[in-house]
Image (cartoon, helix red, strand yellow):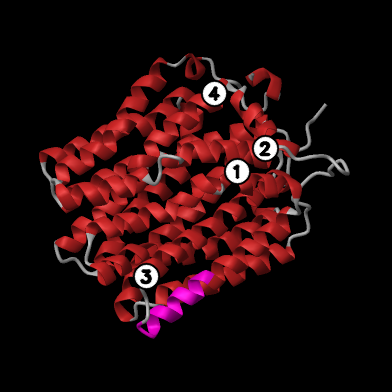
Amino acid sequence: MSSIQPTPLWRNRDFMLLQSGQLLSTFGSGISGIAYPLLALAVTHSAAKTGYVGAVEVAPLVLLSVAAGVAADRFDRRLLMIVADVVGAAALGVLGAAVLIHHVSFWLILVVAFVDTGASVFYRAGNSGALKAIVPPVQLADASSVRMARMSTVRLTAPPVGGALFGVLRGLPFLVDAISYVFSTIALLLTRTRFQEEREPGARVRVREGMAYFWQMPFLRVTVGMIAASNIAAVGVPVALIILAHRRGFSGAAIGAFIALEGVTLLAGSLLSPFLRRVLPMRAILLSEFWTALVYVAFVVEPNVYVLVAALAVHAFWFPNTDSAMEAYSYTLIPDRLLGRAMAAANTLRAASAPIGPLVAGLLLAHTSPRVAVVALAAPVVVAAALGTLSPALRDLPTLGASPAAAG
């Protein structure tokens, strides 16, 4: 009896539409992402306040993920994603206009950074169900790798463009990002697949159901905790790099190019992820991101901007492998009716540490040495590597495609 092969991803109309809209939106986010710290430095001339902006950018991942997960399980996910796009575009348009008329303030940067990321949290909550609805289970890991490869390609070009646009006119990066949301909305309107299964009329959506379901899976509990530690470096090191490069007098375009190198290795990691999953044990792939944080020792030996750029690039290579595996396990093991809330629980826990990275980078660079700052960012990741290596949950991994009960 021959099995029916699923439609190749490149021929999956709704997957391609969804990815196209996300690519353009991600390109805009990459442009504004480099502009936020540059604008904060230009307005405040303070490394600490620039760190505050970085912390506020990631704070919604902690504060709003649960609410977004509930909304994704309760309301129409496509509509939720469209509303998120509109809110994000409006906030960025306000900031871009304020910069152009020279009436921007530090508090406005903080507010817009929070609203912008907050909108993306709700978008991603809906997108988790969208991907599961559009892509067959056997293709979820490959779809995650393909998506990350395309996103990495965009991130490769966006930071230099954002830095260059900021050098031409400081408000341009934010206006370009606002326009990119329009393309994301159009792509959503053109998709045909329902982004959720039929729901039981009148069924209550309880937050604790998602948390309880997530918490009963040892594999997800352990790996989410490890990613929480890794996020301290993943978010904090780029902020430290921007501050240090700015201190050394590098231009916005040059700083964007430094950040873009991370995109190069993210792209390489995404493209090689399917191959690595075939030749390496899953446990090795999951642990590699964390043990690679030892590369920051090179900066301790030689505290040079170029060394930090190289170390960040090497570390980033392994991010897509961990992320694609985590996504595939999550989408496979969590039923659709709980997906938004269970993923919200996971996202909240692993993002809880993300604001710490920019704060540590900004405050330690303002009051101590670059060596101390980078060690403080990398040390939790190495600790997570050691604990993960010893964890039974990573020795006895569930098989992709297993039933939820098998992972309990």
Q: CA distance from mark 2 to mark 1?
A: 7 Å
Q: CB atoms at circles 2 and 1 under 8 Å apart?
A: yes
- Few, some or many residues within 10 Å of mark 4 (<14, 14–19, 20+): many
Q: Quadrant of the N terminus?
A: top right
Residue shown at the point (42%, 40%) measured from the top left: 319
Q: Which mark is residue 161?
A: 3
Q: CA distance from mark 3 to mark 4?
A: 39 Å
Horizontal side of 264 relative to 127 (left or right) equals left
Identify the residue under disc 1. 66
Which amino acid type is marked by label 4?
Answer: Phe
Residue shown at the point (62%, 32%) measured from the top left: 211
Tell me where residue 213 appears, x and y as whole percent. 66, 28
Q: CA distance from mark 1 to mark 4?
A: 21 Å
Q: CA distance from mark 2 to mark 4?
A: 21 Å
Tag 3's secondary structure?
helix
Report the front residue among 156 and 277: 156
Tag 1's secondary structure?
helix
Q: Is residue 95 magenta?
A: yes
Q: Is residue 281 visible?
A: no
Identify the residue under disc 4. 219
Which amino acid type is marked by label 2?
Answer: Val
- The stretch in magenta equals 91-102
Q: Which mark is residue 207?
A: 2
Question: Disc 3 or disc 4, which is closer to the eye?
Answer: 4
252 relative to 1, above or below: below
Q: CB atoms at circles 2 and 4 under 8 Å apart?
A: no
In terms of sequence position, does the residue under pointer 1 or pointer 3 come before the other?
A: 1
Question: Disc 1 or disc 4, which is closer to the eye?
Answer: 1
Q: Quadrant of the C terminus?
A: top right
Q: CA distance from mark 2 to mark 3?
A: 41 Å
